[in-house]
Every structure is written in structure tokens, then in C-alpha cells.
Image (cartoon, rainbow, N blue to C red):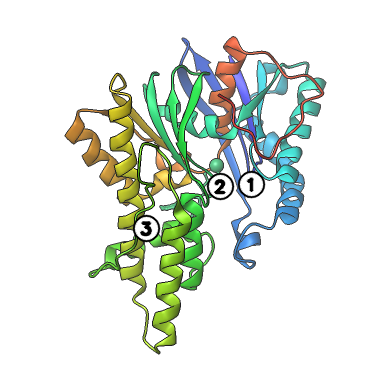
Amino acid sequence: MKILGIESSCDETAVAVLECRNDCEFSILSNEVASQIQVHARYGGVVPEIASRAHCEAITNLVTKALDDANINPSDLDAVAVTAFPGLIGALLVGVNFAKGFAYQYKLPLYAVDHIKGHIASNYLTNDLKPPFIAFVASGGHTSMVLVHDYRKHQVIGGTRDDAMGEAFDKIARVMDMPYPGGAAMDKLAYDGKNPVQFPSAAIKGDNLDFSFSGIKTAALNYINSTKQKGEEINRADIALGFTNSAVGSVITKLDQAFKMYPEVNRLAIAGGVAANSHLRREVTKFSKKHGIELYMPELKYCGDNGAMIAAAGYFEYKNGTPADLNLNAEASRFED
Ligand code: KG4
Ligand code: ZN
């Protein structure tokens, strides 16, 4: 079967055509992403209204291009999947309404996809990953620890109590005058650090799998401001390395706790934009080797928002779920178990 995946929850309009064979074998026939990063960079972050407008401008051509690249017509499709939650409401509505119109026109079943489940599903695209597993999902808007019981049955076992991990990377980059979004640049810069600045852990102490990135972010901002006030130059690489060590170390601390809490699970998957971070990838690799855990990581190009991951999550809805009707609405904050 072939499924069209549409994603518009934040600052990327993304459309893909995915072919699914023998249950869980995926071929990505096309994967188009129209990034709005350039548009938002001058404001230092995503401006929701601008994001919605940019999605409106991009979506029709992107769907046409995705179908052309896949060398198919709409009538060759079997289903449409769209991110319906969580995300920026105006941005989500563009994808949801487009998908509803498209599905109605071509008489295709429509499936609503949870963006976080989509990120997790990016691991199914090119890996032979099967549930159960623990997923660590970190992006600009989300940080979640999820116990994936089955392709459609997810249990949130931990998360952030305040800022998302990617947001913390971006904010620290921003105060160091690096362009938005700073996550990838911080990743590179950390390699030049020699004397990492010490920051507090983002792992909340105790019997939980939660994070707080606001404390480490504030500590970094205070350090930067007080250094500047003393008239001293900040060492951006040492800050990037210190922050990375602390953020990644916190993730490893909580993963260690998670696998102790769920000893029957021995697979780990990471996902989301921050899963592209090379330091995180290195440390989860070490952690998994040490504990004999099977590790799955999406290819770099599928870490950030894309339509293929939404199509993959949509495929499992198509197999066992209920299609959405034309009353489907977008929701800014909802996570489906
Ligand atoms: O998943 P994503 O594309 O969008 C959301 O759903 O938010 O994630 C974007 C986030 C941004 O905060 C970006 O700075 C971060 O992922 N990111 C990184 C790296 N590449 C992207 N953070 C750290 N290291 C990276 N290499
Ligand atoms: Zn995302």
C-alpha cells in the first residue's frame, strides 16, 4: 500500500509518499521538506502566524512535488496521514485542512497522527525495530521518555517539566549570538571546547523519569551574563561543551533509571531533532553497549520533522485504527497513549 504523509506542526512543511510491504517494510518513494528556518531566523525563533502562512504557501506545491517524485497519481494512494497534534495550532490546521480536502477529493481514508508517535516511527523507516522498546524523543518542542508497548500503544513514562531539550540548545545558542536554530551549531562548537563550564544536571532527582531543562538553561544564561558584566570574553566552545555534557549526561542518567525500572525491555530508540546530536548519539551508543541494550537511531535526515515519519505512524493507524472523518480538528497540546 502507498500512503501520503503530511506534516506542518511547526516550522517545516513536509510531505512524503511511503510504500509499505509485508507489514513493516517501508520504501520512501519521496520525501519533500520546505523549511521555514530562513524566515524565522531573523526573529530568533518561530513566529506562529508567519509559520501558518508559510505552510499555506508551500503545501499544495509540495504535495504535487511529492507525488511527482514518487511517480504516482493521487489515485495510486491508499491512505493519507496527517499530523493533527501536538504543535502550533495555526500551523497544524493548515496540514489537517489540506489533508481533509485531499482525502475527500480522492476518496481516501484519512488518519490523524500524533507528532511524537511520528518521531518515534522515524525509527521504523530504515531500521528493523520492533516493540517493545523505550524511546527517548527530544526536539524543539518536546522531551519525552516513552515505553512503546506496540506500534500504536505508547505509554509516556517521563518528560520535561519545563523547557524542551532542543529549546534549551537553541536559547543558549541565541544568547551566544548564533543563528536560529542553534542546536546543530552547538553540536559542532562543543568539539572545540577544552575546559567545559560546569552546569547543573537536567535530570530531576528521585523516582521519576523527568527532566528540567530550565535550570541548566538559566545557569548557562547567568554564567554568560556575569562573564560579560565582568568585561571578560565568554568562551563559547567551553559553554557549548559544558552544556552538552550536562544535557546529554542527564539523558543517560534517566535512561539508566528507565531500563532499571523496566528490566524486561532491552531495546532503545532515540528520535526527534535532537537525536541528530552527535554527542548524544555517541553517549547512547556507549550506554547501550555497556548494558547490552539494542540501540536504534533514525538516519540524520529523518531526525527532524518530515512527512515519511508521519506516513509510517499513519500506516499503523491504517492497519488497525479508525479513519478520521471530516470533523477532524487539530489540537495544540495532546499526547495519545
Ligand atoms: O524535531 P524537530 O525538527 O522539530 C520539532 O518538533 O521541534 O527538532 C528541532 C530541534 C531544534 O531545537 C534544533 O536546534 C534541534 O532540534 N537540533 C539539534 C541538532 N539538530 C537539530 N540539537 C542538538 N544537536 C543537533 N545536532
Ligand atoms: Zn518534531
Mark 3 secondary-structure assignment: helix
* Image vertical order of residue 277 relative to residue 318, above or below: below
Left or right placement of residue 102 versus residue 138 in this view:
right
Q: Which residue is mark 2?
A: 141
Q: Are marks 3 and 1 in contact (CB under 8 Å)?
A: no
Camera-side residue: 79 or 282? 282
Camera-side residue: 21 or 139? 139
Which percent across, then down, holds residue 87?
A: 65, 42
Q: From where the camera sits, is residue 311 visible? A: yes
Mark 1 secondary-structure assignment: loop
Which percent across, then down, holds residue 292?
A: 20, 28
Residue most extreme to the front? 206
Left or right placement of residue 322 versus residue 141 in this view:
right
Q: CA distance from mark 3 to mark 1?
A: 22 Å
Q: Identify the mark nearer the N-term, 2 or 3.
A: 2
Q: Are marks 2 and 1 in contact (CB under 8 Å)?
A: yes
Mark 2 secondary-structure assignment: loop
Quadrant (top left/top right/bottom left/bottom right) for the C terminus: top right
Q: Quadrant of residue 83?
A: top right
Left or right placement of residue 303 versus residue 43 in this view:
left
